[in-house]
Amino acid sequence: MNPVKIAFAGVGYMGQVAHLRNYVNRDDCQVVAIAEPRPELARKVAQRYGIPTVYSNHLDLLNDPDVQAVVASQPHLRNGHLALPLLRAGKAVFVEKPMAGSLQEAEAMQQAAEAGKTFVMVGLMKRHDTAVLAARELLQGLYASGELGRLQRVRAHCFGGDWIHDALPPLTTQESVPADPTFQPIYPTWMDAEQARHFQAYLNIMAHNVNLLRYLYPAPLTVQTAVARRDNRLLHTALLTSDDGVLVELAGGSVRSHEWQEETTFYFEQGWVKLATPTPLNRQTRGSVELYRSTDGKSGQHQAIIPPIDWAFRRQADHFIACARDGVEPVSSGRDTIHDMRLMEAIFRAMILIDGGG
């Protein structure tokens, strides 16, 4: 089977540390080009990884017949700017989460993918995490069997912490990214400049958690209310509900911690399932899944599910390559991820802002 020929648009920190290393030196794909506006960095990366072709602009990839798919690891406000022409040209495109800076731009990206008869995949790597997959299988069984009764509540939070854990550093230079006069960020039209600034910070963190909620509990959700700090709207709690009356609490913030603080817990009538997701850039760690059950409310049983160590970013790369090779839509497609964008804009519309003390 011929390898999928892939190009990289951008080889900065995340492009190298989280992505490029998962695509080189494998039989099922070949990295044939990079598009990077910093010439010295482009040269160093191409030399280190044996990449034959270097461009300074992502538009140069449009006319390269060797490029079937593009990994565009860029700040999310640039996703549409990079992806739209590539998708229209029929290239499969991977972008980092969140999908875009606004629902409007996310919808335009999906429309471009459909026009180009291809797909856009969003980098929601938690869908490939072994603990998440173990929790999903367990939850699907509990939803179907009713073994723990009805699901009543879901509580999810991401408070951050050390997300790097001494990951191997990327190649660097002293170059700055040159200004691109053709780039114009697209914000939600209903937001003022202050809202838009806070919204981008919110998207960058909470995109994973909103998507994870939908992946593990696929019922449609309605935003009821949200409360956030006026000066830091990532520090928030949102309340959502399903048509079945399940309450969903979503909270975000930041904390200094040597550990990664991110959990999602599903409370049934007779027990719960707790998922703890691992430090994102640590290749040698794993998440955990805990099942608790109590039929009489006086005694109970704990069961720990220990998934294998298998880095979610690498598994995500496997999935993108397979989808590009087989022409199938990925699990975190633009078509699916648009629902995340819609929910996150709805959370911001519902926010009640409070002032911090001090």
Image: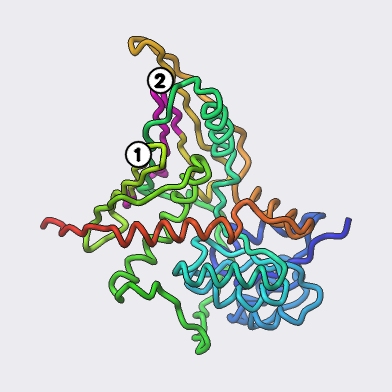
Measuring from the top left, give residue 136's x and y in whole percent: 55, 36
The residue where tag 2 is placed is: 270
Measuring from the top left, give residue 141's x and y in whole percent: 57, 27
Q: Is residue 6 visible?
A: yes
| Callout 2: SS | loop
Which of 49/291 is in front?
291
Whether residue 200 sits left or right of residue 194 in the image: it is: right
| Numbered mark located on residue 52 in the image | none
Which of 315/91 is in front?
91
Q: Quadrant of residue 264?
A: top left
Measuring from the top left, give residue 54's x and y in whole percent: 71, 78
CA separation in Å, label 1 and label 2: 16 Å
Q: Quadrant of residue 82?
A: bottom right
Based on the picture, tell me whether residue 258 belongs to the magenta stretch. Answer: yes
At 81% from the left edge and 73% from the top edge, which residue is drawn? 66
Whether residue 97 sits left or right of residue 117 in the image: it is: left
Q: Which residues are magenta?
A: 252-274
At 47% from the left edge and 71% from the top edge, which residue is drawn? 104
Q: Tag 1: residue type?
A: Leu
The residue where tag 1 is placed is: 247
Which of 281/226 is in front?
226
Which of 108/166 is in front?
108
Q: Is residue 17 visible?
A: no
Quarter of the image where the N terminus is located:
bottom right
Measuring from the top left, give residue 43's x and y in whole percent: 67, 77
Mark 1 or 2, nearer chain start: 1
Quarter of the image where the C terminus is located:
bottom left
At 40% from the left edge and 15% from the top edge, which residue is drawn? 294
Q: Tag 2: residue type?
A: Gln
How crowded is the residue under tag 1: few (<14 C-alpha within 10 Å), some, or many (20+)?
Answer: many
Image vertical order of residue 190 relative to residue 357, above or below: below
